[in-house]
Amino acid sequence: MQTIEPCQLLEWDSQFFGRNIGRVTEHRLEPQNMAAINVWCTDHLIDCLYFLADSDHADTIRLAEDNGFRLVDMRVTLQCRIADWQARAVNGRPSEGCVRPVIPSDVLTLQAIARKSHTDSRFYFDGCFSLERCGALYELWIKRSCEGHADHVLVAELNGQPVGYFSCHRQGAQGQVGLVGMSEEAHGKGMGQYLTHQAMQWFADQSVESVEVVTQGRNIAAQRLYQRCGFLVRSVQLWYHKWMPNCTSREI
Ligand SMILES: CC(C)(COP(=O)(O)OP(=O)(O)OC[C@H]1O[C@@H](n2cnc3c(N)ncnc32)[C@H](O)[C@@H]1OP(=O)(O)O)[C@@H](O)C(=O)NCCC(=O)NCCS
């Protein structure tokens, strides 16, 4: 019988942050697998261990917090069925601006927006990853999305300039939102909502039946945006990070 490792090494994250980073395989903890996790971390010289916990399992939360894991994010997954979105029949085009597919000359501007936009994410909140690395992570993410990692990227344009992005992924009838961001000057003008509706139209055109998006519990702007467009909460999980030894400043 094949034994499942208690954790897995995250090679991409480890290389990007220059530290050994792993992730707990399961979403629940028991006292006996806590011991196995600690041994695995020692054997793999782990600096930082991520753990995505089921938020409704009290023993898991207690064990995580008693064993040095720090809460860094509430991961909120929202879902919208395309049929429900179509029944709402609103796409609220704002009085200014437009939405169009990305073109190669947008990429540098979108990278600059991404560098500043995702400060609610767990990497910033962790407090040990440097602001430079956090910004670089999202800069690289949007660049790769535009280069074909995403199935479709839409750009919001205001006064002839790109001001926001929305990346879409598709697997059969299931759609997944990738990265969404809007430059600060364009916030609160309804562009986010228009961009989301245009993305939902693209998903509908691809015969997608249901779309999921993940955001942070602390990100009220994003939650209101998706709720306005018909998304409902599907799950809430808790992201924990554990640093070994304990980390107290943005030194990574
Ligand atoms: C989330 C985001 C894309 C919204 O873009 P936007 O163009 O400002 O959105 P809209 O103008 O269409 O407004 C959509 C909703 O967000 C709300 N909103 C916008 N900025 C807000 C803020 N700073 N605080 C609280 N709500 C905010 C609006 O009030 C609106 O909700 P309402 O209709 O109930 O009032 C934008 O705030 C952003 O880029 N944030 C940083 C990146 C991010 O969080 N991306 C999503 C990660 S999943």
Image (cartoon, rainbow, N blue to C red):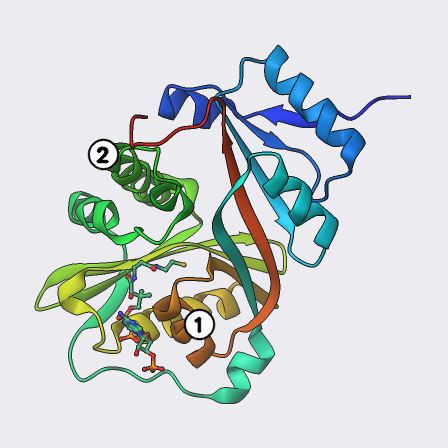
First in sequence: mark 2 vs mark 1 = 2
Say if residue 116 shows up in the picture: yes
- Is residue 226 found left or right of 193 in the rendered image? right
Image coordinates for residue 124, horizontal then vertical, percent: 33, 44
Q: Which mark is residue 226?
A: 1
Q: Is 150 drawn above or below residue 162 in the view shown?
A: above
Q: 89 or 235, which lies in front?
A: 235
- Is residue 109 found left or right of 71 in the rendered image? left
- Name the residue: 54% across, 87% down: 87
Name the residue that disc number 2 marks. 132
CA–CA distance between discs 2 and 1? 29 Å
Q: Residue furthest right?
A: 1
Say if residue 208 shows up in the picture: no
Image quarter for ligand 1 equals bottom left
- Name the residue: 41% across, 62% down: 218
Q: Mark 2 vs ligand 1: CB under 8 Å? A: no
Between circles 2 and 1, the one closer to the viewer is: 2
Q: Say which element carries label 1.
A: helix
